[in-house]
Amino acid sequence: MKNIYKTFLFCGILALMAVLYSCEDYLDRDPESIISEEVAFKNFTNFQGFIEEIYNCIPSKQKYYWVTSYNWGDDEIFNVTSDANSMMCNQIDQGNFWAWQNSEHSWLDASRADPTSNDKFDHRLWSHAWYCIRKANMGLENLDRLTEATDEEKKLIEGQLYFFRAWWHFELMQFFGGLPYVDEVLSSTASLELPRLSFQECADKAGADFKKAADLLPIDWDKTSAGANSTGKNQLRINKIMALGYLGKNYLWVGSPLVKNGAQVGGANTYNYDVDYCSKAADALGQLLNLVESAQSQYELAGFDYEDIYNHKKAGDGYSYSDIFYTRGQSFLMPGAAEAIFRGPVWSSNGSAWNFLKTWGPKVNGLVEHDNIIHHPTANYVHNYGMANGLPLDDPESGYDPNYPFKDRDPRFYHDIIVDGFKYVNASIKPEDEHLRYAGLHTGGTMRGVSNGSRTGYFMQKFAPHECNKYDNAYSWGNGIQTYLPYMRLGDVYLMYAEACAATGGASASSSTFDKTAEDAVNTLRDRVGAGHVNQSYLGDNNKFMDEIRRERAVELAGEGFRFHDLQRWLLLTEYPYNIKTSQEFDRVESDDWYKTNDCKDAQVANFREETILTRQFGVKHYWFPFKVSDVSLYPEFKQNPGW
């Protein structure tokens, strides 16, 4: 660790002399800023150039290598092939949490890291966190050099630095727990004695930094004098909404069952939250939502109005739900619509199309090209998609019929999940591949090979439309598909708010900053997609209502990389049924020709059942990742996580 901090010191100094890369080339830098610290920090343009490198370090969790893995909960499994053995998801399934270190298939770390690079492979979380924390501290300690700036410009600089110091700490805390919270520029010669703080102590420090950032930053840079030079290109810049969102998320984490009760097995404390911290979370998130719903911000929920939901063809104008995750035919426009709150940069126009778009569909007969790697949604996870009336599948009043399992489901089911009989190829197809036009996902079907088809009976097209195949060729350069998963979006904020409020007082609870109740917040998202409200039978028992919030998170945020942390902070990572991964087995009743003239959701099936693929053997130690042995060996105060 001591050697690491020394490296960060010299890297930080060298960064002042480098030609710094801007997230979107927003601002021109004064060439003289490479001369000295006095010049580098003297005015807004130069100081902002210094901060731009921190933006550039934010990793893209789904585009850090040719084939990526970032869904590590019970939500995803890879196909059975030697190519998938090294995937981080597979390593997590085996309990090998050490695999996060220096693996090309983990977005947490890699042997190569360059904060000035515009190559997506050069940016990982651990590799850049300590470097960026040091830069933030250097900036804060040099604020007095910012003499040629307006009060507005000074606040913009200071607010960004406080945000980033907290954000990089917080992102690491979710994996490792409490850390040394570094809030000063460490000497390269002094002895290191920084102890590991508890998660709560770290969260208190991060919360103070997020709060300062929220107080200093504007809602919209486009409406500031300093942001006028980059109007229309300020979407990624840190603002008040982002700071409030992470302030709330930070407090929700520290109020979680995991942090309050400590890592444990058994699930007895899964509903045992810290009410005081959850109240703080609700107030911060409520302040954000109040600004949004009173039209004081640039953010809003994307629409969910489709004329053809299977092909993601929206009805009318405006942003669609799909636009949050990928854009198509818009010259590689960055996704997110007006719903994405916090994102990092995209380093190349076609950076996602080469492989990410080719890892979601069947490799049978080369239908989807390139590496034989497939992300599969697990059957147990797909079970979270309830009925259109808002009830979960296992509710006796839901109307769910396992003989017609795809009928009358939550509208997001049809947007996200590909089922048996789905028309997978729209374009002309070679006669020898005609049997692949409609997805054969029943047991023994044409797309059920565990090595090159669906291991679970489902595919997902939330992030890569099914037309990403060699016939429809949606992943070609000419189609201009760009993908990006936001770190935080508005839908997530509504659900965090609902959870925080419910932890303090149940379905009818609200915050001091926003009038909507926990129940209202969940129903806001269901109204967006046209699903039924939370049923009255789930409102009187707070545990049952919390289960509905958790199920709503599973559906709304499916495949976006949040599930592992949710199960972790709820103390459910080790518990059945969250420690299993299953496949959906069933027999077709309809003929193959039936699917050519009928909707696949109306199909009748037989012998609909789940079969367990694997059970994850997790214990208490798996609630936190292990630190590198080389780091915890450098000085006594930096201790390893228990069990590792």
Image (cartoon, rainbow, N blue to C red):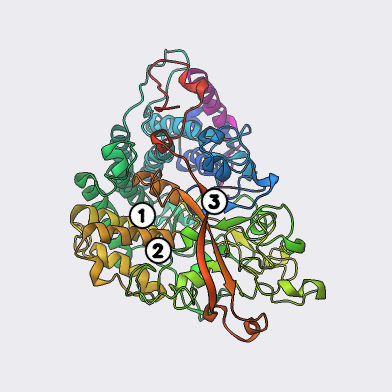
Which one is in front, 339 or 470?
Answer: 470
The answer to whether the residues at label 2 and label 1 have Cβ atoms under 8 Å apart is: yes
- The magenta segment: 1-28
Q: Would you call the spot at circle 3 few (<14 residues within 10 Å), some (14-19), or many (20 or more)?
A: some
Q: Which residue is mark 1?
A: 241
Q: Position of residue 422 (x, y in %)?
A: 61, 74
- Give the numbered dot on residue 26: 3
The answer to whether the residues at label 3 and label 1 have Cβ atoms under 8 Å apart is: no
Q: Position of residue 598 (x, y in %)?
A: 59, 85
Q: Residue at x 44, y 48 (%)?
A: 579
Image quarter for residue 262? Answer: top left
How much space separates mark 3 and mark 1, taking CA atoms? 20 Å
For marks 3 and 1, the one nearer the N-term is 3
- Say if residue 320 shows up in the picture: no
Quadrant (top left, top right, bottom left, bottom right) of the C terminus? top left
Q: Position of residue 156 (x, y in %)?
A: 39, 46
Label 3 amino acid? Answer: Tyr
Which one is in front, 535 or 517?
Answer: 535
Q: Which residue is mark 2?
A: 299
The answer to whether residue 22 is magenta is yes
Q: Which element carries disc 3, helix, strand or loop?
A: loop
